[in-house]
Image: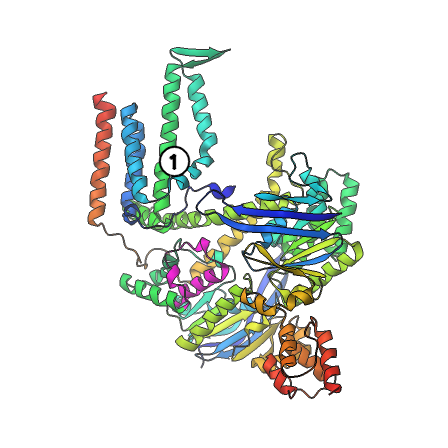
Amino acid sequence: MGIIKTDNLVFEYIRRDEEGNVEGITRAVDEVTLDIKQGDFVAILGHNGSGKSTLAKHINAILYPTEGTVWVDGMDTSDEDKLWDIRQSAGMVFQNPDNQIIGQIVEEDVGFGPENLGVPTKEIWERMEESLKAVGMYEFRKHSPNKLSGGQKQRVSIAGVIAMHPKCIVLDEPTAMLDPNGRKEVIRAVRALNDVENITVVLITHYMEEIIYANKVFVMDGGKVAMEGTPREIFSQVEKLKSLRLDVPQVTLLAHELKKSGLPLPDGILTKEELVTALGL
Amino acid sequence: MLRDITLGQYYQTDSVIHRLDPRVKLVATLIFIISLFLVDNFIGYAVAALFLFMVIKLSKVPFKFMVRGMKAIVFLLLIAVVFNLFFTPGEVVFSVWKIKVTKEGIYLAAFMAIRLVFLIMGSSVMTLTTTPNQLTDGLEKLLSPLKKVKVPVHEISMMMSIALRFIPILLEETDKIMKAQIARGADFESGNLIKKAKSLVPLLVPLFISAFRRANDLATAMEARCYRGGDFRTKMKPLIYQKRDRLAYLVCWGYLLLCIVIGKILF
Amino acid sequence: MSIILDHVNHIYEEDTAMAFPALTDINLVIPDGQFIGLIGHTGSGKSTLVQHLNGLLKPTSGAIYYNGADINDEDYNKKELRSKVGLVFQYPEHQLFEIDVFSDVCFGPKNLGLSKKEVELRAYAALKQVGIEDEYFYQSPFDLSGGQKRRVAIAGVLAMKPEVLILDEPTAGLDPKGRDEILDQIAKLREETGMTVILVSHSMEDVAKYVDRIIVMNKSRILYDDEPREVFKHYKELEEVGLAAPQITYIMQALKQKGLSVDTDITTIDEAKNAILSAIRSK
């Protein structure tokens, strides 16, 4: 069994009108079965409202399944005794950098998680140091988070999670509020964690260029897993992605259009170099 | 405009004052405030001024930064001065129409102004040199005897710490919302009081909604990082008194004693 | 009828140790009816620049003229200016406050002191212009999706009947489809009304398809100001300041280098497809 496993996960919530009467039931996650192995880099893709964030919140035991089961490192998330172990094993980074930094100084924020875990003082400092170094923010350890750029803030948030020594880190649209430079910084830090520290990464996003590095991609729509495969397999299906409110990198789109016009090109071209080679130049 | 409020903001640098135990700084601030109400003559204020000046100098916080924080209380200051100046009975110095300015009034107004300015400056030194985390750690530890009588000391200090962290963020947001509404023709300045109060609705509604959303997000983020109250927590920066802290206590108590002597015994 | 910026400078926190220039020597002429993309990354000064255009910020030095009049003259009517130069901020959450969508859009025209009937007519027209259907009119703006909130926020400014519409990052946080929908809507809007539109964005790729002119800002200065295809010719320099030309530019450059005779000024997928097909067939 992998580090994260879900079996027929269903999550429903009840919609109520202003008087509190039940208006209906919405199924945000619908029978999702996943198995993610230790060390994987998994991307979960989907438009806004596709259920991808709701799914993510189950991995950290912030939400509990209505039906089905979620296991994190072999622990059932609905087992209340294991709650803190689960949250320690699966760290979570959220979308808005301002709403998850608790400390007034970078280093204090990174220390917040270990403090909650009851880690001895000396070790908290060691963990703070190594985590900030891992995301390249060590030189900013004495700064106030308010003065950092969006990308830097998100890297601090990531360091705050690494300091808890998780096996897996779930990033819920960590780049949605950042500019292109910030996005690159964050993705670079995330890739380094996966490559160097072998931490399992679950990246939730709607930016297509960020999933190229994943070794597995799940595309969600209407609470279900609509597509599943390697980035190349996913990008081969341009029309299907479009119907799921997503787009593809321009080079993939161009190759797809050229193919439709009769050029003999393979599906799922991801870079301009691949296009050049495929055109026989 | 809103950025000018320095109260509750941390000024990052390395100084003796920055390194002091927050408990010392809390107690010292309290002592300083008490001293301001003990002394009521020029020598006393001179001593207080000297003490404050020394601390500010040691803190390495630029004086300009401190003065900017005063802008926020200018209005309060004016009211205090005007009230004392015009409504204190005593020996009349001069009078304009029905308003009499008395010698006692001038004294009182001046002292009140000095007190207020010193009070704000004294407390700003503390907030400028102490991170909210240290501050609340200090408070928590100072007040920890109250835990025995079931006061949720840790929870209160955590709430304060978060409130302080979000002040600059919410101020910036207020600025943005104001601009967005001004761009839609909103007017926050003219009109009578009722009209002015009404004009705040387009500002306050988005601000409250945003604050609630932030609070909700933050609570989730804290839980995700295994926050579960104060019971199991260890400290990254545990509070242990150093030699300099004991020395600082000595200076503070000495200062208080001096103020008592000057204010109550000598004169 | 135009906006003219003459040697505009803006320094934040002037006279303090933290002083930094947000705008340095900005000279621009924005004639009526242009569709402009204003590009730069965070901190490049682009948001500061647009806040000067409707008088929210005052230049430290230099002057801004709207239809010939200096907008920072003491007796210039700023309120009227703000109805003529409409600015929609990045997050709709910063401006939506009323109990329902329709009343929220009424806020702007009501501030102009128009009659109730005129206010409602304008609000109705504005909501229709951004493609919000009647069924949403009496819903709370907070219950809408991200894309719809954005439309309502734009309608809130449109209802003031501006001559110039400035949109600060109208696509931030939207998913790809939502982004395309809102940009298409803005393009359509411009076609119908002929108003000047300034689109502020991080992304060349997003705006390349729509605009007639791109202004690139970097470190408080204007770096390029030209037609999109001219600006993209500087793709190497753009890269150096952390901005990228659309991916298509790089593809065409790579193909050209490998000996395919294609035009490298191409900015859209369709043009690229046709160019490649004809180049390969003629080989």
Work out whether A29 lies above or below C67. Answer: below
In front of the other: C135 or B244:
B244
In front of the other: B207 or A265:
A265
Q: What residue is rendered at 43% in x and 39% in y?
A: B69
Q: Disc 1 sits on a residue from what chain?
A: B
Q: Residue C176 at what x, y percent from top left?
A: 64, 67
User: Residue flagged by tag 1: what amino acid is it?
Assistant: Ile
In front of the other: A136 or B259:
A136
Quarter holding the C terminus of chain C is bottom right
Magenta part of the chain: A135-164
- Residue indicated by mark 1: B120
Residue A136 shown in magenta: yes
Q: Quadrant of residue C113?
A: top right
User: Is residue B243 visible to the viewer in this orientation of the structure?
Assistant: yes
Residue A101 shown in magenta: no
- Near mark 1 (Cα within 10 A), the count class, few <14, some 14-19 or many ≥20, is some
Q: What residue is rendered at 27% in x and 47% in y?
A: B16
- Residue B228 falls left or right of residue B264: right
Q: Residue C158 at what x, y percent from top left?
A: 73, 50
